[in-house]
């Protein structure tokens, strides 16, 4: 897995010079990460593990939208193309089943939350991986350091460079219209405001940040 901005759209069918995803925050990277999360678990336990991490991060319950899952799966030609490109370049672990990895990825894309919970998730990252409301340590501080570094350089898709120059804080946008902004050691901020700009970020959210 790389850690550099891709320089192209978040769903572009391209890999870095090592034939790996450019970073974990674009589609190819997210598919790769999905293939690496608890592959030894049964599918249901694997998804429950992922949901539990999000629950702990926000100190509440996230939900799952099956309608979004079906939509993701039924309009996934580009993601299938990315997965098979990575398979053709031997990017995956040898035992990875493409259909299983993609199914899990689509499930993860269908996890649902709101801006209030997302702000607590951002706050947990700002707090070194410990939920500020519950005191639950979800991630080690070294892991959070890596997460925030990649968010700072790649979290706003092709706008990441300008965002880092003008705002200077780690952030991650999502195509649903949300943005998480991290002020390390101080606070987390979340906005939700569709529609998106040409980069795939919330237009109003970017202006707010």
Image (cartoon, rainbow, N blue to C red):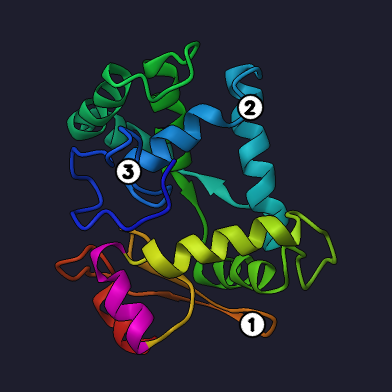
Q: Which residues are magenta?
A: 157-166
- Residue with the mark numbered 2: 38
Q: State yes or no: discs 1 and 3 in contact (Cβ < 8 Å).
A: no
Is 67 situated above or below 168? above
What's the residue at 68%, 67% (across, down)?
A: 124
Q: Nearer the viewer, residue 100 or 159?
A: 159
Res 155 quadrant in image? bottom left
Q: Nearer the viewer, residue 97 or 22?
A: 22
- Residue with the mark numbered 3: 27
Indicate which disc residue 187 carries.
Answer: 1
What's the residue at 69%, 81% (across, down)?
A: 185
Is 161 situated above or below 207? above
Is 90 situated above or below 137? above
The picture places residue 26, in percent across and down from the top left corner, at 34, 49
Q: State yes or no: discs 3 and 2 in contact (Cβ < 8 Å).
A: no
* Magenta portion: prevailing SS class: helix
Q: Sequence order check: which comes first, mark 1 or mark 3? A: 3
Q: Sequence order check: which comes first, mark 2 or mark 1? A: 2
Does 11 lie within the magenta span? no
Q: State yes or no: discs 2 and 1 in contact (Cβ < 8 Å).
A: no
Tell me, yes or no, if residue 53 can be seen here.
Answer: yes
In the image: residue 195, left or right of residue 170: left
Tell me, yes or no, if residue 68 can be seen here.
Answer: no
In the image: residue 167, left or right of residue 76: right
Q: Nearer the viewer, residue 124 or 191?
A: 124
């Amino acid at each position: 897995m790389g850690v550099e901005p891709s320089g192209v759209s978040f769903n572009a069918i391209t890999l870095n010079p090592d034939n790996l995803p450019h970073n974990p925050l674009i589609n190819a990277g997210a598919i790769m990460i999905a293939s690496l999360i608890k592959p030894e678990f049964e599918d249901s336990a694997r998804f429950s593990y992922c949901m539990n991490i999000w629950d702990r991060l926000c100190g509440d319950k996230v939900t799952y939208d099956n309608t979004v899952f079906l939509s993701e799966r039924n309009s996934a030609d580009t993601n299938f193309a990315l997965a098979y490109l990575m398979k053709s370049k031997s990017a995956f672990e040898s035992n990875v089943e493409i259909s299983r990895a993609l199914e899990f990825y689509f499930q993860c894309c269908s996890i649902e939350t709101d801006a209030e919970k997302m702000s607590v998730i951002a706050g947990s990252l700002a707090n070194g991986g410990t939920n500020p409301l519950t005191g639950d340590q979800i991630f080690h501080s070294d892991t959070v350091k890596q997460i925030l570094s990649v968010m700072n350089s790649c979290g706003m898709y092709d706008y990441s460079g300008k965002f880092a120059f003008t705002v200077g804080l780690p952030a991650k946008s999502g195509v649903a219209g949300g943005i998480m902004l991290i002020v390390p050691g101080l606070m987390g901020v979340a906005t939700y405001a569709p529609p998106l700009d040409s980069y795939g970020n919330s237009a109003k959210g970017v202006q707010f940040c």
